[in-house]
Image (cartoon, helix red, strand yellow):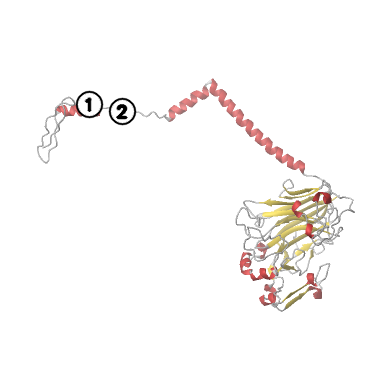
């Protein structure tokens, strides 16, 4: 039996519990029952949290009051005013962009939508083997493998030379002589431009890539005007698609004294980070200077970058506007400038060229005879070029670019073209099998002369 003991001053004395049987229950005295009932009886809990109906009632009372109505009107006016200011600011930006676009009277010089065979009365193939001034790794051909029209597009496609001649011919025992075949289009028909050989003893290789360069040289050119090209850039590591212009007559001498206009050029390498400038970027530049050591392109260049798509995934329109006061390029619409160079000062004096070359030769102003010293050499006729180059040693593919730590050649190497070919297992797989995806596709070209 169990007993509960307590002080008489604290609780009433309880009688003993009694146990009757295994089927019975514990029994307590009436005094104990009344004590525990008194101890456990408390008021029911009531939450102080606002009910939804209370909230609605409070809001309703506030908004219907004079102060509430005044506050509501003030908030609405603040919102309406902010929205109006935002819309006006956006409209001002659009209007400013539109008004900043110069409007001249233009005469159409060229319009080609490539709906049929290539118009050879307009477009001429540059056929050379020397890699041009940038010492590129391709030779240019007039082969249908490297340029063709289809479905209303012009395609300029790089291919492997080994596909035509075999792998062994690239490294030894082959001579490519474009002079003998009569196909070399270089103004200087020297071996450097028109002949290529492969020799394993010296490590000399043929240009490992074939591509195409199409120009309007001798057929269409403009001095001050507009150019508009809708194109999709090429894909594949180390491909170099370009829409650009060169002077028809080289009035001020050889490159870069007579200038160069790059409307849009890109790189086919795959984009791996937001810092990369490959298929997500096009660059516009002007090249000018008294000699090759002092090409001042860095003072006249601009970059247009996409963040959610690539220039080699979709077609984009690239434009050039050129008059006596400035040259500027745009992407998409004329009001979206990519780059602008204003000719508001004497170009020679403002460029601060060095007075002598590295070998000590005095540097002279090649544009001093011009009647337009602010804009020369860009005061002469230029023709259009469409091409896809591959590689090169002029620095367009920079040795120190952190985006390409595994670049397979050095621009200052002994035989960079051979090094590029040796590393083909690293770049050939990046070239799409479909030539239409690999190459640059051009939807249309338009040129106007200011008149």
Q: Position of residue 322 (x, y in %)?
A: 81, 50
Q: Position of residue 119 (x, y in %)?
A: 79, 63
Q: Nearer the viewer, residue 129 or 414?
A: 414
Q: Nearer the viewer, residue 47 or 417?
A: 417
Q: Tag 2, which secondary structure?
A: loop
Residue at image location 81% in from the left, 49% down from the top? 350
Residue 151 visible within the image: no
Query: In the picture shown, does residue 182 fall above or below 260?
Result: below
Query: In the picture shown, does residue 340 fall above or below 83?
Result: below
Residue at image location 62% in from the left, 61% down from the top? 405
Circle 2 packing at 10 Å, graded few (<14), some (14-19), many (20+), is few
Residue that carries the numbered disc 1 in the rendered image = 38
Q: Quadrant of the N terminus?
A: top left
Residue 5 visible within the image: yes
Query: In the picture shown, does residue 312 fall above or below 38?
Result: below
Residue sticking out furthest to the top: 66
Q: Tag 1, which secondary structure?
A: helix
Residue that carries the numbered disc 2 in the rendered image = 44
């Amino acid at each position: 039996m169990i007993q509960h003991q307590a002080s008489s001053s604290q609780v009433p004395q309880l009688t003993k519990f009694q146990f009757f049987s295994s089927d019975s229950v514990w029994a307590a005295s009436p005094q104990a029952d009344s004590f525990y009932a008194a101890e456990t009886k408390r008021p029911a809990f009531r939450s102080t949290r606002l009910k939804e109906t209370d909230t609605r009632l409070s809001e309703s009372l506030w908004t219907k009051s004079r102060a509430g109505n005044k506050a509501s009107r003030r908030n609405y006016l603040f919102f309406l005013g902010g929205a109006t200011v935002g819309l006006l600011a956006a409209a001002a930006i659009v209007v400013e962009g539109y008004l900043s676009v110069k409007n001249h009277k233009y005469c159409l010089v060229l319009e080609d939508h490539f709906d049929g065979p290539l118009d050879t009365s307009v477009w001429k193939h540059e056929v050379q083997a020397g890699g041009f001034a940038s010492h590129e790794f391709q030779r240019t051909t007039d082969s249908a493998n490297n340029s063709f029209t289809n479905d209303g597009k012009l395609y300029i496609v790089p291919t492997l030379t080994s596909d035509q001649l075999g792998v062994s011919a690239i490294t030894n025992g082959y001579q490519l002589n474009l002079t003998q075949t009569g196909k070399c289009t270089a103004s200087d028909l020297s071996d450097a431009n028109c002949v290529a050989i492969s020799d394993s003893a010296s490590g000399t290789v043929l240009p490992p890539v074939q591509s195409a360069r199409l120009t309007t040289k001798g057929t269409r050119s403009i001095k001050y005007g507009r150019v508009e090209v809708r194109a999709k850039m090429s894909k594949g590591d180390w491909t170099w698609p370009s829409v650009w212009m060169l002077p028809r007559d080289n009035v001020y001498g050889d490159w870069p004294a007579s200038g160069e206009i790059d409307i849009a050029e890109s790189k086919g390498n795959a984009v791996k980070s937001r810092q990369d400038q490959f298929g997500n970027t096009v660059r516009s530049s002007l090249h000018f200077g008294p000699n090759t050591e002092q090409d001042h392109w860095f003072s006249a260049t601009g970059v247009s970058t996409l963040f959610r798509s690539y220039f080699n995934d979709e077609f984009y329109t690239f434009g050039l506007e050129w008059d006596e006061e400035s040259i500027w390029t745009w992407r998409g619409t004329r009001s979206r400038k990519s780059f602008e160079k204003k000719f508001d000062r004497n170009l020679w004096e403002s460029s601060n060229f060095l007075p002598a070359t590295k070998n000590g030769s005095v540097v002279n102003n090649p544009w001093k005879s011009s009647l337009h010293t602010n804009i020369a050499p860009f005061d002469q006729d230029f023709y259009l070029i469409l091409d896809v180059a591959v590689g090169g040693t002029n620095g367009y593919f920079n040795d120190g670019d952190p985006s390409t730590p595994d670049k397979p050649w050095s621009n200052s190497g002994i035989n960079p073209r051979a090094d590029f070919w040796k590393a083909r297992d690293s770049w050939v797989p990046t070239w799409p099998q479909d030539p239409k995806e690999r190459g640059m596709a051009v939807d249309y070209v338009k040129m106007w002369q200011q008149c």
